Image (spheres, helix red, strand yellow):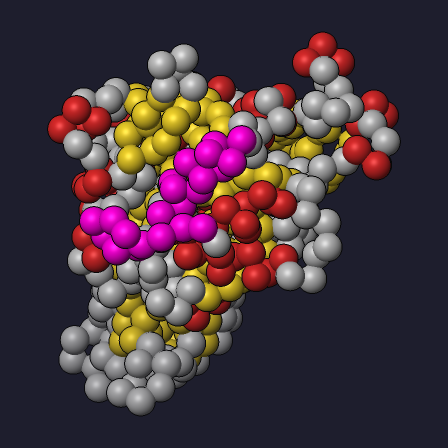
């Protein structure tokens, strides 16, 4: 699957609105970028590079958390990565991220998790003195770039819902008007009450932006607000920043003041209204984080339903941004899919399942289960009330039933663990059947040990395997057996501790050719 965003090269000195050139950028699901400029992009002499700056230095005190605000997760990915994802969908030359609070942690997270060939650079704002100062710090990353004729998108790292199309439109309008600065605005509502107000002159042109803390009562009634997302002409931005003053209610250098500086020096300053109201949803506290996640989840669910995934109740289905689903998957209420989970075609998940970094094959049925770092093969059935812990792998056609827990378990093709069992650090061969109440005693107080159960083995109820121990192919156990030593193929293990009766399966098969013998009850008198 691919997504693509169209961004127009609107340098007015080369093209008018009627003959605009288009650049297509495809972004694959793995985050890699494929840039292809169409033939009419225009001569390279007229190309204006587009770059971006993300402001991610704030502490986010209202989150009341030791985690930097921009690293709080939204649908399985740090908030800041959603911002970067939107930016790398554009034909940018580079992205500069301004870090401050938790700088090392933010930088490390982004470097480890971002998936793009686009250069991502970091600069540190050691003292937070406002957004204007942050952008001044960001421009130091361009010191080695002599080309000042490009444009820069500037946006906060706490605006995770902005779509690439909104940013593309911002840049398009900016170039259509040959503007020095273009600001993305939104309508005033309860979510934007703290935003700066957009003041226009008598002709309806943008005059200035007034921060809420500096606004008069009359200005607070203005219904148009600043989203803090801008596009600037880079060659004009740095001189304007040098003219800022911290003489305001916050004692900071406001980036919004750049708009007034540019307008007063005769440059065009433009405001464009966001056609997507979610572009103005910034995250400053836990309530806003939850609201943003709800919007993002709705987008994710809608996309998957359009691609052939069935959801009985989308409002109660939770899918991380990194999850992959194939057509004809059916998700029942209470399903939570996290991390790198992949689900094959025709599988049914739910109700009430949580799958984390789990790979599920085709035609799997899993219900009331928790699985983490697990692989489940085609045509398996799992649940209800199953816990599959890391390292578990179910081969095709395996069955794991009610109240079963597994950890680091390798379950063979068509093997069955129907109910009430713990199978930890175990290898179970194809077609083996594990009776109810059976467990592997895998821990001796110091070390974990493995149990191996062969193909076609038949394990009776309440068998305990004291690892390390190996049970051969077609071996059997009696109910309640405690197996402390290896069981040869075809043998019967019974008793406490179990006595090994070699050749038992072959003898019984000869006595009862019509069917497989039942395992005898444990002999409680045996020592």
Percent across and percent down for residue 132 are 41, 51
Which of 35/511 is in front?
35
- What's drawn in magenta, residue-wise? 243-266
**Quadrant housing residue 34:** top right
Task: Say which residue appears at 28% left-offset and 67% top-offset.
Answer: 439
| 297 lies left or right of 267 | left
- Image quarter in which the N terminus is found: top right
Residue 117 position (above or below residue 143)? above
Task: Say which residue appears at 51% left-offset and 36% top-offset.
Answer: 265
Percent across and percent down for residue 189 are 22, 24
**Quadrant housing residue 477:** bottom left
Q: Residue extending furthest top?
A: 18
| 247 lies left or right of 375 | left
In the image, residue 269 lies in the stretch drawn in magenta: no
Percent across and percent down for residue 71 are 36, 56
Task: Say which residue appears at 29% left-offset and 86% top-offset.
Answer: 444
Q: Residue extending furthest left?
A: 217
| 160 lies left or right of 441 | right
- Image quarter in which the C terminus is found: bottom left
Task: Say which residue appears at 54% left-offset and 27% top-offset.
Answer: 268
Magenta segment, principal secondary structure?
loop
């Amino acid at each position: 699957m691919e997504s693509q965003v169209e961004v127009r090269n609107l340098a007015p000195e080369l093209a008018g609105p009627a003959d605009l050139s288009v650049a297509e950028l495809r972004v694959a699901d793995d985050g890699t970028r494929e840039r292809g400029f169409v033939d009419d992009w225009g001569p390279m002499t007229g190309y204006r590079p587009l770059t971006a700056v993300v402001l991610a230095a704030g502490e986010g005190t209202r989150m009341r958390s030791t985690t930097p605000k921009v690293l709080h997760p939204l649908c399985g990915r740090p908030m800041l990565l959603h911002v970067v994802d939107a930016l790398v969908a554009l034909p940018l030359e580079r992205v500069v991220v301004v870090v401050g609070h938790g700088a090392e942690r933010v930088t490390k997270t982004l470097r480890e998790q971002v998936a793009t060939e686009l250069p991502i650079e970091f600069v540190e704002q050691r003292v937070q003195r406002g957004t204007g100062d942050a952008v001044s710090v960001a421009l130091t990353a361009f010191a080695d770039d002599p080309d000042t004729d490009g444009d820069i998108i500037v946006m906060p790292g706490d605006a995770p819902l902005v779509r690439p199309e909104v940013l593309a439109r911002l840049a398009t309008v900016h170039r259509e008007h040959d503007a020095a600065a273009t600001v993305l605005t939104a309508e005033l509502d309860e979510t934007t009450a703290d935003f700066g107000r957009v003041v226009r002159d008598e002709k309806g042109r943008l005059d200035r932006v007034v921060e809420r803390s500096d606004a008069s009562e009359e200005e607070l009634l203005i219904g148009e607000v600043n989203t803090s997302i801008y596009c600037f002409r880079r060659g004009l931005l740095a001189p304007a920043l040098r003219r800022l003053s911290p003489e305001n209610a916050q004692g900071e250098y406001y980036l919004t003041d750049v708009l007034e500086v540019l307008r007063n020096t005769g440059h065009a300053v433009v405001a464009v209204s966001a056609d997507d109201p979610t572009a103005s949803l910034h995250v400053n506290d836990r309530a806003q984080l939850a609201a943003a996640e709800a919007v993002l989840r709705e987008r994710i669910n809608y996309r998957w339903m359009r691609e052939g995934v069935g959801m009985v109740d989308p409002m109660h289905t939770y899918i991380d941004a990194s999850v992959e689903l194939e057509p004809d998957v059916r998700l029942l209420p209470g399903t939570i899919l996290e991390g790198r989970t992949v689900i094959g075609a025709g599988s049914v998940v739910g109700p009430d399942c949580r799958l984390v970094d789990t790979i599920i094959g085709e035609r799997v049925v899993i219900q009331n289960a928790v699985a983490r770092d697990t692989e489940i093969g085609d045509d398996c059935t799992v649940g209800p009330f199953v816990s599959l812990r890391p390292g578990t792998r179910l081969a095709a056609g395996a069955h794991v039933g009610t109240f079963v827990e597994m950890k680091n378990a390798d379950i063979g093709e068509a093997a069955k663990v129907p109910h009430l069992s713990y199978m930890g650090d175990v290898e179970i061969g194809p077609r083996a059947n594990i009776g109810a109440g059976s467990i592997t005693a895998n821990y001796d107080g110091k070390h974990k040990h493995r149990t191996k159960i062969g193909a076609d083995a038949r394990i009776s109820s309440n068998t305990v395997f004291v690892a390390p121990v190996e049970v051969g192919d077609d071996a059997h156990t009696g109910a309640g057996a405690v197996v402390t030593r290896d069981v040869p193929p075809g043998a019967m293990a019974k008793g406490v501790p179990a006595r090994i009766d070699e050749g038992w399966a072959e003898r019984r098969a000869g006595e009862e050719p019509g069917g497989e013998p039942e395992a005898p009850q444990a002999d409680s008198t045996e020592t």
